[in-house]
Image (cartoon, rainbow, N blue to C red):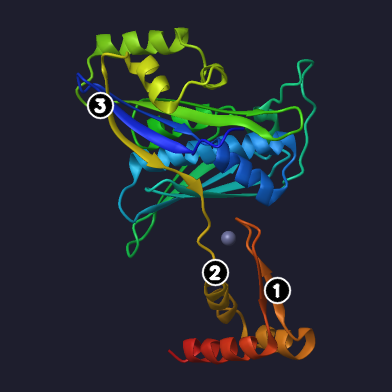
Amino acid sequence: MTNKHDHLVKSISNDGMFRAYSIDATNIVSEAKRRHHTSDAVTEALGRSLIGGVLLSSSVIKGRETMTIKIDGRGPVGLIIIDADANGNVKGYIQHPKAKVTSDSNGNIDVGKVVGKNGYMQVIKSQGGDEPYTSNVELVSGQIGDDFTYYLAQSEQIPSAIDVSVKLNQDGSVEYAGGYLVQKMPGASGDAIEKLENHLKMMPGISKLMSNNQTPADILKQILGSKNTKILSKTPTQFKCNCSKKRFANDIAGLNPNDIKQMINEDHGADVTCNFCGNHYHYSEDELKAILILADSKKHK
Ligand SMILES: [Zn+2]
């Protein structure tokens, strides 16, 4: 790993027919691994999901909207939950961080086996005040890239191609992680689509490109052609959790007051661990008494 910073680059073809985004997410996936203590198989599965989450959210939500993606293929990892916003912040939860599958003779992990494919992907878009928009699709392969591509075609009606990859070092640390997304714009001609599809098939995969030290901007030029690529923006992306002691206090206040009283009188305090980032929060008896007052005031509203 190097000290380069994760970032997302957005581009559009000069003819306006396609847009393409590419991300270096090496630090995001390293941070997820560090926080969740994942096995190698899970680092790859969660990593691909985080990368897909940033690519999807940055292409279909904007402003202060947020997106939650639930992936459950009924495989050894169980449920994966990704939370992303439109500004490059992402966090992830995985049900079984230590799940393992046997790798092939080259040491490659089949992510589809880890995730499973007999399940669904659910995407929830929240605009703040309004009812969130929820959409479900079945998983295609559990390889994650295909599954995001299928979601975009089925639920958003945007023909796209998504490729995501996580490469680990021998010791399980993240060597590189990243991905790209290409989308058809309304004006794309049939000929141009066919040409791009053929080009993508011929092009080396994202894993190969990243192993050759190609930056996201380099990768976009490979996809759209160096003379046809107009770079629109380059934004930092990061693993970031928005949990806080106050936020969890609010959750506790929503519990049955008798449960809070039990925490005060029997447990003499409470400890909460965030599922997304692993941060711990401790509440003393006095803090819980204050929360109990808050809970009562909520009840009488
Ligand atoms: Zn957190």
For the residues marked 3 and 1, what is the alpha-carbon distance in whole angstroms?
A: 49 Å
Ligand 1 under 8 Å from disc 1 Cβ? no
Q: Which badge, 3 or 1, is on the more N-terminal residue?
A: 3
Query: Which residue shows up at 48% across the image and 91% down it?
Result: 297
Query: Which residue shows up at 53% across the image and 35% down it?
Result: 138
Instruction: Give the image quarter of residue 279.
Output: bottom right
Q: Position of residue 272 (x, y in %)?
A: 67, 70
Q: Are marks 2 and 1 in contact (CB under 8 Å)?
A: no
Instruction: Nearest to the eye among marks 3 and 2: give it.
Output: 2
Q: Which mark is residue 271?
A: 1
Q: Which badge, 2 or 1, is on the more N-terminal residue?
A: 2
Location of residue 209 with respect to 231 vertically, above or below: above
Query: Which residue shows up at 62% across the image and 86% down it?
Result: 287
Instruction: Give the image quarter of residue 281.
Output: bottom right
Q: Are marks 3 and 1 in contact (CB under 8 Å)?
A: no
Q: Amino acid at mark 3?
A: Met
Report the residue marked by disc 2: 244
Q: Amino acid at mark 2?
A: Ser
For the residues marked 3 and 2, what is the alpha-carbon distance in whole angstroms?
A: 40 Å
Report the residue marked by disc 3: 185
For the residues marked 2 and 1, what is the alpha-carbon distance in whole angstroms?
A: 13 Å
Q: Position of residue 82 (x, y in %)?
A: 53, 47
Query: Viewed as shown, does residue 56 lie left or right of 257?
Result: left
